[in-house]
Image (cartoon, rainbow, N blue to C red):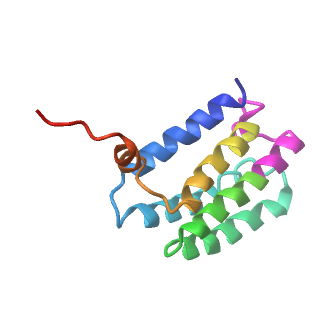
């Protein structure tokens, strides 16, 4: 269950983000990935190194304003930070020991969607359904 739920949460995030209409979807996701860079600042488990990710993610988010690929890269960078915190035993949510592990599984799901260009999942599903004949 510790692997399945983060995947489900990632898919729910992708569905919710798909509801944002273009041309606003990509800039919104860029801001979101920029904010994710500051997620660990209050925990401080890596000392001064905690300031590296927000700086890098700010640059990545800026590049993500014009590129889905950069947004996907940002989610993978956040995944690496999640793994570091999980291995160190300093989770993103202090009350859940495996929260960084779950985040490290959830983030690549969102990254894959970003690498695909952040399409509307609902439009994609509708396009793949067989046409029903009208009577």
Q: x, y percentage for residue 11?
A: 54, 40
Residue 38, quarter of the rendered image: bottom right
Judge whether residue 37 can be spotted in this image: no
Visible residue check, residue 104: yes
Which residue is at a point 50% across and 46% down the rendered structure image?
14
Q: Which residues are magenta?
A: 81-99
Residue 32: x and y in percent read 52, 58
Taking 31 as reference, is 42 left or right?
right
**Residue most extreme to the right:** 88
Q: Residue at x 36, y 40 (%)?
A: 129
Q: How many marks?
A: 0
Residue at 65%, 48% in the rendered image: 107
Left or right of residue 53: residue 9: left
Q: Quadrant of the C terminus?
A: top left
Quarter of the image holding residue 63? bottom right
Residue closer to the observer: 40 or 78: 78
In the figure, 10 relative to 23: above or below? above
Queried whether the magenta region covers residue 118, the answer comes back as no
Of all residues shown, which one is farthest toward the left? Answer: 135
Q: Quadrant of residue 4?
A: top right
Left or right of 83 in this view: 34: left
User: x%, y% of residue 57?
Assistant: 65, 67
Task: Give the image location of residue 92, x and y in percent.
Answer: 71, 42
Quarter the N terminus occupies: top right
Residue at 55%, 54% (x, y): give it.
Answer: 113
């Amino acid at each position: 269950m510790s692997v399945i739920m983060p995947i489900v949460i990632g898919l729910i995030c992708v569905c919710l983000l798909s509801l944002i209409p273009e041309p606003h979807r990509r800039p919104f996701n860029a801001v979101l990935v920029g904010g994710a860079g500051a997620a660990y600042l209050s925990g401080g488990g890596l000392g001064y190194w905690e300031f590296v990710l927000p700086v890098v993610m700010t640059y990545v988010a800026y590049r993500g304003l014009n590129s889905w690929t950069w947004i996907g890269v940002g989610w993978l960078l956040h995944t690496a930070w999640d793994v570091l915190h999980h291995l160190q035993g300093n989770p993103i949510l202090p009350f859940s020991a495996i929260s960084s592990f779950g985040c490290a599984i959830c983030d690549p799901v969102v990254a894959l969607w970003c690498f695909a260009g952040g399409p509307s999942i609902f439009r994609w599903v509708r396009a793949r359904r067989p046409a029903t004949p009208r009577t």
